Amino acid sequence: MAKKIDLTGQKFGKLTILEEVGRTKQGKVIWRCLCECGNFVDVSSISLRSGNTQSCGCYKREQTSKRSRIDLIGQKFGRLTVLEDVGRQNRKVVWRCLCDCGNTVNVIGQSLQNGNTKSCSCIRNEKTSQRSYINLIGCVFGKLTVIEDVGRSNYGKVVWKCQCECGNTVDVVAGSLQNGRTQSCGCLHKELLSETMLGENNPSWRGGITPLNEAVRNCIHYKEWRTSIFQRDNFTCVHCNDSTGGNLIAHHIKFFSDIMKEHNITTLEEAIQCEALWDVSNGITLCKKCHKKEHKRKDLL
């Protein structure tokens, strides 16, 4: 019998020999080997030394994959432009793609080539949205009046530009308008929060010393008067034509404080009954800058 050659520790291709584990029927030594990929495999010495076996089988699969792999980088499929190879999924090449809508998505090469995947899913979302599209222009939701369709969200939902009664404009998804989740640009929430903090509900309450003027300006009559002024003046400052929503103020031509003094108003109930306070002809829309000038002018008189 030929003398056995100890191959322990030697490397053949991707295989490193660990130990002898037996012999073949023909008496050839069988060696336990560790492959670079992490797998273990038992190989006869003759297969190792002849070069017939150089891995656990992974090398052959890699070569087969490389021969069949088509480089798709830079190619476009529908709305998707291929950016890079990001690995394998069930032995199939996965590509990272940039969609025309701006999203990135990982897609199996076969799905790109056979046309099964043409976008990040935005096409499907748009088709669904178009089937359920309802024109909301002119509709009123709470304090918001819909002005125009301004596009789609990242999820394919219709987005509407809305004019709030306070003068601001805001973009809102259709569903949020229709289910009542959004009813203003945010001012309604602030107003409701403000109302819950009036009087004894306010942690700063000191037994009723809150100024009467503040109470009047927070009542519903004042808010309705202010809205009427804004709508009549098309949400624009009558002095400088500024139409910056959150920058507008409804100003009493005959000053609010003067009316309060003239009618000797000492309670909120008396203010509500005073027609002079709610006369729309006595109000104009001003921006904060012009409003400040009006009060400075009054101080100089």
Image (cartoon, rainbow, N blue to C red):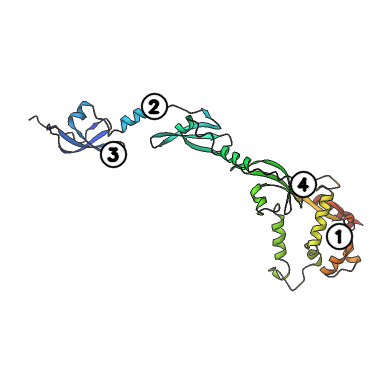
Looking at marks 2 and 3 on the same chain, the residue that comes earlier in the sequence is marked by 3
Using the rendered view, name the quadrant where residue 92 is placed: top left
Counting residues from the start of the chain, the first of labels 4 and 3 encountered is 3
- Identify which residue, 22 or 144, lies in the foreground: 144
Q: Residue at x 89, y 63 (%)?
A: 275
Q: Give the image quarter of residue 9.
A: top left
Q: Residue pushed farthest bottom?
A: 207
Question: Residue at label 1?
Answer: 278
Q: Is residue 296 left or right of residue 39?
A: right
From the top left corner, tell me how far across and down residue 231 is, in percent: 82, 50
Residue lying farthest left? 1
Residue at image location 20% in from the left, 29% down from the top: 47
Crowding near the residue tagged with mark 4, few <14, some 14–19, many ≥20 C-alpha atoms within 10 Å: some
Contact between marks 4 and 3 (CB within 8 A): the answer is: no
Q: Amino acid at mark 2?
A: Ser
Q: Is residue 224 left or right of residue 204?
A: right
Question: Which of pointers 2 and 4 lies earlier in the amino acid sequence?
Answer: 2
The type of residue carrying mark 3 is Asn
| C-alpha distance separating marks 1 and 3 | 86 Å
Marks 4/1 in contact by CB < 8 Å: the verdict is: no
Query: Residue at the front extreme?
Result: 131
Q: Amino acid at mark 1?
A: Trp
Provide the residue designation for mark 4: 244
Q: Which residue is mark 3?
A: 39
In terms of sequence position, does the residue under pointer 1 or pointer 3 come before the other?
Answer: 3
Q: Secondary structure at mark 3?
A: loop
